[in-house]
Image (cartoon, helix red, strand yellow):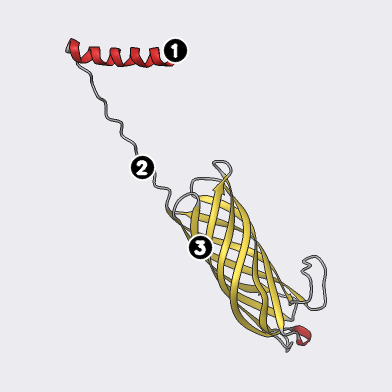
Amino acid sequence: MKKSIMSLAAVVAMSSFGFAGGDVAVIPVVVEEVDNSSFYLGLGLAAVSTRDAEVSMDFFNDKSGQGRLGNIAFQAGYNYNEYIAVEGRYSTTISNEDSVEMSGWSLFVKPQYPVTEAFNIYALLGFGGVTMDAVNESAVDVDDSGFQWGLGASYDFTENVSVFFDYTSLASNMDGIYVNGALEADADAFTLGVTYTF
């Protein structure tokens, strides 16, 4: 009942403007569209584990059937908005344990979520290729491509500069010849780097 009376009162009040000949000013509201799209470039250092697919990953111990590498990683991407981006990466070995070196490329769709104004979390979903070659006459020959994925986080120090850390699964059961005659190889990377947004 109370709502009916309030509604009736509102209708009467509004109609009295028309009968009284009063001027009612309509003020247009301008909504400014915010463009969150941007290009970015990045550079990182990656700790990479290449190994026989039957061997578990261990970055901290020397393990038979695993090579621990240091790679440099380059990235270029485009943020469509604050929630989705596309990104390309290229990585190549700059240090190794005298058995394997690796290079790889990746194309990712990057769903991302801004936890705060400066801190973001993201996933990497895509496709890429990995090449593993012998060092010091070890029997390694892997050159294959497939699904890749990763998880990471970034922190914006300024409007343009941010630091990121992520894990990526670069190869899973890829065909080829690895150390000790293995016929399938895996590769994973932990990357720490910096990006510049234009």
Residue 160 in percent (x, y) is at 49, 49
Q: Of 131 and 22, which appears nearest the observer?
A: 22
Name the quadrant containing residue 126.
bottom right
Going by the numbered disc 3, the residue's amino acid type is Glu
Secondary element at tag 3: strand
Going by the numbered disc 1, the residue's amino acid type is Lys
Where is mark 3, residue-wise? 87
Q: Of 19 and 111, which appears nearest the observer?
A: 19
Name the quadrant containing residue 131.
bottom right
Residue 147 in percent (x, y) is at 59, 71
Task: Looking at this view, name the residue that lies furthest to the front.
Answer: 1
Residue 172 in percent (x, y) is at 67, 73
Can the viewer see residue 116 in this picture?
Answer: yes
* Residue 52 position (above or below residue 107): below
Task: Looking at this view, name the residue that lies furthest to the top.
Answer: 20
Going by the numbered disc 2, the residue's amino acid type is Glu
Q: Which mark is residue 172?
A: none
Secondary element at tag 1: helix
Q: Residues within 10 Å of mark 3 (few under 14, many from 20)?
A: many
Q: Of 96 and 155, which appears nearest the observer?
A: 155
Image quadrant in which the C terminus is located: bottom left
Q: Is residue 72 left or right of residue 55?
A: left
